[in-house]
Image (spheres, grey):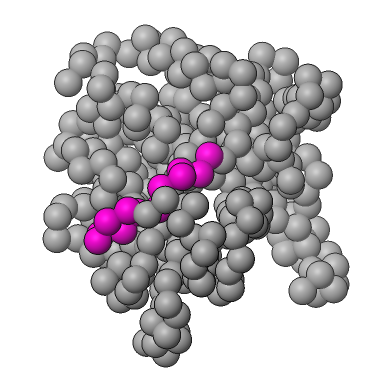
Amino acid sequence: MWLLRKLAFPISLVYGVIVHLRNYFFTIGWLPVNTFDTPIISVGNLSVGGTGKTPMIEFLIRNLSSEYRIAVLSRGYKRKSRGFLLADESTSVQELGDEPFQIKRKFKDVAVAVDANRSRGITILEKIVGPQIILLDDAFQHRKVLPTFSLLLTTYSCPYHRDWYLPTGNLRDAKHEAKRASAIVVTKCPPLSEEQKTSLELALRKDEQQPVYFSFLSYEEVLHSDGGEMSITQLQHKEFTLITGIANPKPLVDHLKDKGLRFHHLEFSDHHFFTKKELEKINNRKLVVTTEKDYVRLQGKVDPLYYIRISHRFMDEGGEQLMQQIRERLTLYSLRSP
């Protein structure tokens, strides 16, 4: 794979040119940008792969839902439906996509919709839901919508300033477009010194006014399932299999190994929908542990099945500072509490 990516370098140059031209046409107004009356908070990245967008959407819901009526709009990657779809109790994970389904499952009072055409999706949500804030998932590169607040995520292990364009690297947008972000969050960080933070801030920040925050993934000590709960320490004397269908399972694998756990790991591609043959193989395992995102695709098909929840935790007071920055931006709108 590494060699193929290197051989594809000429293709990545062409891709980079196309990306720059596209952004230039948006900047000079040759391509239209839509604005909306509803405040829109966009969460996204410059690369493909897992930077923690869904946990960040959940972080925003937890911090804003008591004050505002929130809707979430996602593309619904790899879903089996088309067009606009507003989730309800009967909507399946196949129709909605795993990440929107996970959000709706966890936050039942939040309107969750999917539409590849974000402008259309926002317009429909404004008409039928009337949200006070729309959280736009995975939309940093979606220039057709001008957000009120744009949150750019990048991982500590592969920050965008050290990356390159697809297919040689993982970048799907130009590095200098980071200047459009209202704030940058470096996710999945190890413990960092102040010198390390300062060095990374200088490398990432494209605008002197841009705040840079640092976060890490926090794993719950309790495993969940429809049938009950189990402490993660109970796995120390159990034979189990870890199933992952996410972009980067390494942080979870490392976390479980750090706990002294021994397990067999079956790794699948991101957003993978499991075949009948794969499910038969998985069901031969004594105990299966997976991510919350994978659980919604395996639920009712594998037993016994447990999942581990993850969330963003910010270093220092980064979370509070980020929410203060967002609330200050929202004061520009006449918003009423629900």
Please say whether residue 227 is one of the residues in the magenta stretch: yes
**Residue at the spot x=62%, y=24% of the render?**
315
**Closer to us: 214 or 174:** 214
Query: Is residue 96 visible to us here?
Result: no
Please say whether residue 13 is one of the residues in the magenta stretch: no
Q: Position of residue 31 (x, y in %)?
A: 52, 42
**Closer to us: 269 or 302:** 302
Q: Is residue 157 above or below residue 302?
A: above
Task: Determine whether, in the image, residue 252 is placed left or right of residue 177.
Answer: left
**Residue at the spot x=65%, y=34% of the render?**
186
Q: Which stretch did the figure color magenta?
A: 218-229
The number of callouts visible is 0
**Residue at the spot x=39%, y=38% of the render?**
58
Q: Position of residue 265 (x, y in %)?
A: 58, 71
Q: Main secondary structure of the magenta part?
A: strand
Q: Is residue 230 above or below residue 145?
A: below
Query: Is residue 320 visible to us here?
Result: yes
Q: Position of residue 174 (x, y in %)?
A: 70, 43
